[in-house]
Image (cartoon, grey):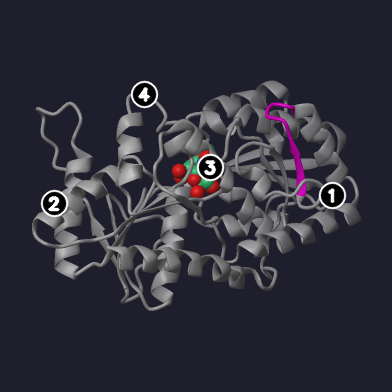
Amino acid sequence: MRIAIVCYPTFGGSGVVATELGIALAGRGHEVHFITYKQPVRLELLNSRIHFHEVHVPEYPLFHYQPYELALSSKLVDTIKLYGIELLHVHYAIPHAYAGYMAKKMLEEEGIYIPMITTLHGTDITLVGKHPFYKPAVTFSINKSDVVTSVSAALKEETLKLFNIEKEIEVIPNFIDITNYDTEFTDCQRSLMAEDDERIITHISNFRKVKRIPDVIRIFHGISKEIPARLIMVGEGPEKEDAEMLCDKLGIKNKVVFLGNSNEIDRILCFSDLFLLPSETESFGLAALEAMINRVAVISSNTGGIPEVNKHGVTGFMSDVGDIGDMVKNALHILKDDQVLEEFKQNAYKEASRFDIKHILPLYEAVYEKAYKAN
Ligand code: GMT
């Protein structure tokens, strides 16, 4: 099949999932066209079945806001026609489903019918999408999609609760490719980051409010009062500066390293013992899954889709949002004993393998097939 994928090309989970999905689809013989404003961060183009088309938005001084949706829908129309694309898969409802629907309608005027799959990722529903300024457009574009998928059962429930949805929503969880982790890294350079007797705790996110970054720092503070430990913070975002200041205030500056954005998170996770994800809300928690497949135990909140990924008492522990004391207690239970830690690490890997791409890719191919036939 010739498939167009629209996503955010940045470090967010939705872009990562869309990119990895496209690469895997190309591996199965499909021709995949990424259409977005920048080359997605995890996209390597050394494959004749993967194409990238950049959306340009000309700057015009009269416009206070440059019309990206307009440029995207025009680019979709042109690319779909030029390459004979048969199916459009948009990741993240805002504004991709909206622009996709416009493209679909424009193409219909020319006798070209193309099915559109919309995948909901979380913040397009739980944070941004439900805002009254966006809600009518989001509801409309979800209902006008040919197939709607959501990355967790929790996100599906939330969508049905918040919006007036007439469409069936299919749950297709996020995934990882287990073949990349069959064997443990041999060049895992733990000594670069910590002393032998220190536990390594990691957090990876885009440092937005929803991630509760101060909780991450305070959980680590609690842990480091009891055992030797280091915290590695990976990512960039609006909460980063305050987090650096909080580390200074708590006197743990020399135990915390802020690495910024990284394309090599597996290299960091391979020597991590524990992953912290105390988010306010999380539709799935792809970062936790990536930690788990790297044999890292997870301490998280119990919100949204996280319970579908992190198994309480098995791969880590979950606590109520903001219950820092409970998170510290659980982290210490895992970290204080080598044998307990090893058990959690192995469980994390085993549970993560349920989300191997070989189980998930056929689910996407099945919805593509269904949408294509129904069109
Ligand atoms: O979590 C973020 O801030 C990024 C956001 C995104 O849209 O890229 O992530 C959402 O989608 C990911 C991939 O499906 C999920 O794993 C994240 O849980 C979800 N984030 C939230 O719901 C806050």
- Give the structural element (helix, strand or loop) at label 4: loop
What residue is rendered at 80% in x and 40% in y? 331
Marks 3 and 2: CB-CB under 8 Å?
no
* Residue type pointed to by label 1: Asp
The residue indicated by pointer 1 is: 197
Mark 4 or mark 1, whichever is nearer to me: 4
**Residue at 47%, 29% in the rendered image:** 238
Which residue in the structure is indicated by mark 4?
132
Q: x, y percentage for residue 148?
A: 41, 51
Residue at 49% in and 55% down: 263
User: What mark, if any, has residue 155 been given in the picture?
Assistant: 3
Amino acid type shown at disc 2: Met
Q: Earlier in the sequence, mark 1 or mark 3?
A: 3
Q: Which mark is residue 108?
A: none
346 to the left or right of 153:
right
At label 4, counting other C-alpha atoms closer than 10 Å, the crowd grade (few under 14, some 14-19, many 20 or more) is: few
Residue segment shown in magenta: 316-323
Q: Of the two numbered discs 3 and 2 on the same chain, state the one appearing first in sequence.
A: 2
Q: Nearer the viewer, residue 153 or 30?
A: 153
Residue at the top extreme of this rendering:
249
Q: Secondary structure at mark 2?
A: helix
- Name the mark nearer the viewer: 2 or 1: 2
| Residue 372 point in image, percent of width and height | 31, 66
**Measured Cα–Cα span from mark 3 to mark 4:** 19 Å
| Separation of marks 4 and 1 at Cα, in angstroms | 52 Å
Depth check: give the residue in front, 235 or 253: 235
Under tag 3, what secondary structure? helix
Q: Are marks 2 and 4 in contact (CB under 8 Å)?
A: no
- Does the residue tagged 3 have its C-beta within 8 Å of any atom of ligand 1? yes
Q: Residue at x 70, y 49 (%)?
A: 310
**How would you rate the neighbour count of disc 1 (Cα within 10 Å): few for under 14, some for 14-19, many for 20 or more?**
few
Q: Amino acid at mark 3?
A: Leu
